[in-house]
Amino acid sequence: MIHSHAMRRAFHCTKAAGSSSVGLKQVLQDLIPQRKHDILELKKNYGNVKIGDITIGSVIGGMRGNTSMFWQGTSLDAYEGIKFQGKTIGDCQRLLPKSPKDSNGKGNFLPESMLWLLMTGEVPSIEQALHLSAELAARGRQLPDYTDKLMSNLPSGMHPMTQLAIGLASMNKGSEFARKYEKGDIGKNEYWEYVFDDAINLIAALPQLTGKIYSNIVAGGKPLGQFREDCDWSYNICSLLGMTSEDSCNRQNLDGKQSEDFVNLMRLYTGIHVDHEGGNVSAHTTHLVGSALSDPYLSYSSGIMGLAGPLHGLAAQEVVRFLIEMNVMISSPQSGREIEQYLWNLLRCKRVIPGYGHAVLRKADPRFIAMLDFAKARPEEFAQDKNVILMEKLSEIAPKVLKEHGKTKNPYPNVDSASGILFYHYGVTELLFFTVIFGCSRSMGPLTQLVWDRALGLPIERPKSLDFKSLGALCR
Ligand SMILES: CC(=O)SCCNC(=O)CCNC(=O)[C@H](O)C(C)(C)COP(=O)(O)OP(=O)(O)OC[C@H]1O[C@@H](n2cnc3c(N)ncnc32)[C@H](O)[C@@H]1OP(=O)(O)O
Ligand SMILES: O=C([O-])CC(=O)C(=O)O
């Protein structure tokens, strides 16, 4: 039954077939009818096929191992790590278009190329990637004035992630989807078009919003750089952070090479943090909130609030704090013995080692390795940085300690282990800010899914819950 013709069709005929249109929305428009048909067929013919058993352990254990979400863009294997539409990070590095302005061709792919891949399942041509990049730049020129004013008036000292969630939620005032829905102007089949427009507008606004948040914390809200419509999304994030040698105040006096490297670090970081299949807190939250037909701004603002938890995205800030504090306490970042002692003290105090462990992965996170490789490829830049040396040394020591400690299912480094410290190296030293950059990247995966959720007509999410008495009754 599983190998029937209809089943094979449902899984194999949904590719974009290399659409030549340069407009992402047009390509989706062409793809949707077939996929919608396929999902309806799947539901009709195979709706009762069993995927797994739900145990009491999973109900009271954070739903671990409970495979119960539909997610199209990425999938996570415990040993191989993340795949973006079936492609590893290495595949993406080889296949996805880069910026033509990249001076030596060794830069990272554009996150815009990744967004295209996630949305369509196809590697974009350079024309398609640049068209999307230009579209984002045109839509992201400025923040809506109400959001800009609101952001200028937030209390000083407010956590940057709270600022991001507020800024995004405020943009719901301009939501095309919410406006059309309220007027009763659209039918179910058209939802995705307005969700798509909102999603693209939201992603486009992130460089300005991120720049505004950073300037709020370091420069009293004064602009740190200029937005350029002829530049890509990551470049604009960097210049609005004041972190490019041209087009910004160049806060850290980066030379041309460092500035180019920083932009490539941003492209790498924001290119690989986009998604981690559906079950992680930020993605799942966005999908859940969106299932109530909350618009993309509200949905992703909720996702950001989840990303702001220290067991999830906020670990990026915790790792940097941890490395800096440890370096003050030990005689050298190479001292394995002192690092080991430091970790045991931490574990005895019942604290977690930030940047280690994972709910699904059971090996070192390939995203961590990609970030580490970025540093290794630039020895003249990083060889003397004792925080980076410690980050690398820790990745040898901490797994041994965690294995001996015996509780952690995955004793290896996760993505947050390496990322913040590389930004810190170039001079973004405001720890609380790192997760905002994560939030820029993470927009792409969950918002892609939100567009597909509406295109496929998926319903409101509403699992059933059980109380203690009912669980007890099941045991008897
Ligand atoms: C982008 C991301 O979200 S990546 C994750 C970022 N978060 C971190 O780096 C924070 C540190 N890590 C952790 O807290 C966890 O490993 C998580 C949240 C990532 C995964 O949680 P779980 O799936 O519950 O992990 P696991 O099943 O291995 O937990 C078993 C036990 O090991 C402990 N443990 C897990 N990781 C660690 C760690 N890094 N240090 C110390 N103890 C740990 C858990 O707290 C738990 O203890 P308990 O039984 O006393 O409650
Ligand atoms: O998958 C997870 O649970 C956490 C994670 O690494 C991510 O969201 O990037």
Image: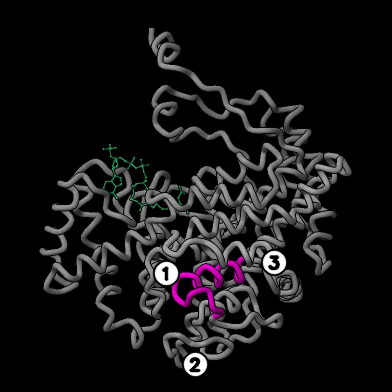
The residue located at (42%, 69%) in the rendering is 371
Q: Residues within 10 Å of mark 1 (few under 14, many from 20)?
A: many
Apparent side of residue 420 relative to residue 347 in the rendered image (left or right): right
Of circles 2 and 3, the one toward us is: 3
* 166 vs 64: above or below: below
Under mark 2, the amino acid is: Gly
Locate the C terminus by quadrant: top left
User: Can you see residue 243?
Assistant: yes
Q: What is the C-alpha distance between the residues marked 1 and 2?
A: 21 Å
**Residue 145: image tag:** 3
Q: Is mark 3 within 8 Å of ligand 2?
A: no
For residue 430: magenta? no
* 285 vs 262: above or below: above
| The quarter of the displayed image where residue 65 is located | top left
- In terms of secondary structure, where does tag 3 sit? helix
Apparent side of residue 10 relative to residue 417 in the rendered image (left or right): right
2 or 3: tag closer to the N-terminus: 3
3 or 1: tag closer to the N-terminus: 3
Apparent side of residue 412 relative to residue 208 in the rendered image (left or right): left
Report the magenta residues as a range: 206-223
Horizontal and vertical percent for residue 415? 41, 60
View extreme (right): residue: 185
For residue 222: magenta? yes
- In terms of secondary structure, where does tag 2 sit? helix
**Residue 371: image tag:** 1
* 377 vs 3: above or below: below
Q: Which residue has dot 2 on it?
A: 256
Horizontal and vertical percent for residue 383? 29, 83
**Residue 49: image tag:** none
Q: What is the C-alpha distance between the residues marked 2 and 3?
A: 34 Å
